[in-house]
Amino acid sequence: MQIEEMRPFVGVGKELLSRLKLQNLITKLAIEPSYYFLRWTHKVSGIREEQPTEIDFPMTEGQMFNHKYELRWKLQHDHLYNVLLLSIAGEHSDFTPIGNSWKVEPNNQEKFPDYAYPAYGYRRNEVRFPKEFIYPKSLDVRHGEDDGDKPLLAQRYFIDGETSAVQFVALTLEGKHK
């Protein structure tokens, strides 16, 4: 088995994106499985499997994550979105690099890309939320319901190589994602 090389990259979009350009970028980065979390001023989507569609816009911000990428977007003005990419698959032509010496934790090359730190979703009935928190049945959020065949919710730390400070914590997937 050939081990995939981990090449950390953090970048911002070269331009603000329209809804259509953002949807095209999401489609380009969406590998199976990918998950989405959308936010509006009055609600959140919960984690879902469906890409945002035209009826979801305009949203104030959102994110897509899979085992290679986390893409974050935020509404700026005139229905244009600023985007940030956290990647373990190297540079991407649509993004301007932020810094040039990123490290990723965990960085166990023998277990990569299956290995990441566990992340735990809120329990569906967490009392600090006014409504039940939503997760797709295809994602294991580590509540003891694992059937052994689902990707696990996980996190990966992007560390500035010059300062050794964690700058970003990206959602990712661990396990059955191939």
Image: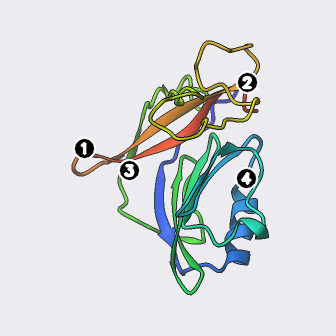
Dot 1 crowding, Cα within 10 Å, few <14, some 14–19, many 20+? few
Residue that label 1 marks: 164
Callout 4 touching callout 1 (CB < 8 Å)? no
Q: Which residue is mark 3?
A: 102
Q: Which residue, as the protein is rendered here, is positioned at the far bottom?
A: 78
Answer with mark 3 or mark 4, whichever residue precedes in sequence. Answer: 4
Label 4 SS: loop
Residue 119, position as x, y percentages in the image = 50, 29
Mark 4, residue position? 30
| Front residue of this view, candidates 120 and 69 | 120
Q: Quadrant of the C terminus?
A: top right
Q: What distance separates the C-alpha of mark 2 from that of mark 4?
A: 17 Å
Q: Look at the picture and state if 20 lies above or below 55.
A: below
Of mark 4 and mark 1, the one earlier in the sequence is 4
- Check whether the beta carbons of the residues at disc 1 and disc 3 lie within 8 A of each other: no
Q: Amino acid at mark 4?
A: Ala
Q: CA distance from mark 2 to mark 3?
A: 29 Å
Q: Nearer the viewer, mark 2 or mark 4?
A: 2
In the image: residue 110, left or right of residue 99: right
* Circle 1: residue type: Ser
Q: Secondary structure at mark 3?
A: strand
Residue 139: x and y in percent read 69, 30
In this rendering, the label closer to the viewer, 4 or 1: 4
> Which one is in front, 15 or 110?
15
Which amino acid lies under the numbered mark 3 shown in the image of this protein? Trp
| Residue 22: mark in rendering | none
Q: Residue furthest front?
A: 130
* Dot placed on the residue nearer the N-terminal end, 1 or 3: 3
Q: Secondary structure at mark 1?
A: loop
Residue at (61% x, 35% y) in the render: 132
Say whether disc 2 or disc 4 marks the residue closer to the N-terminus. 4
Q: CA distance from mark 1 to mark 2?
A: 33 Å
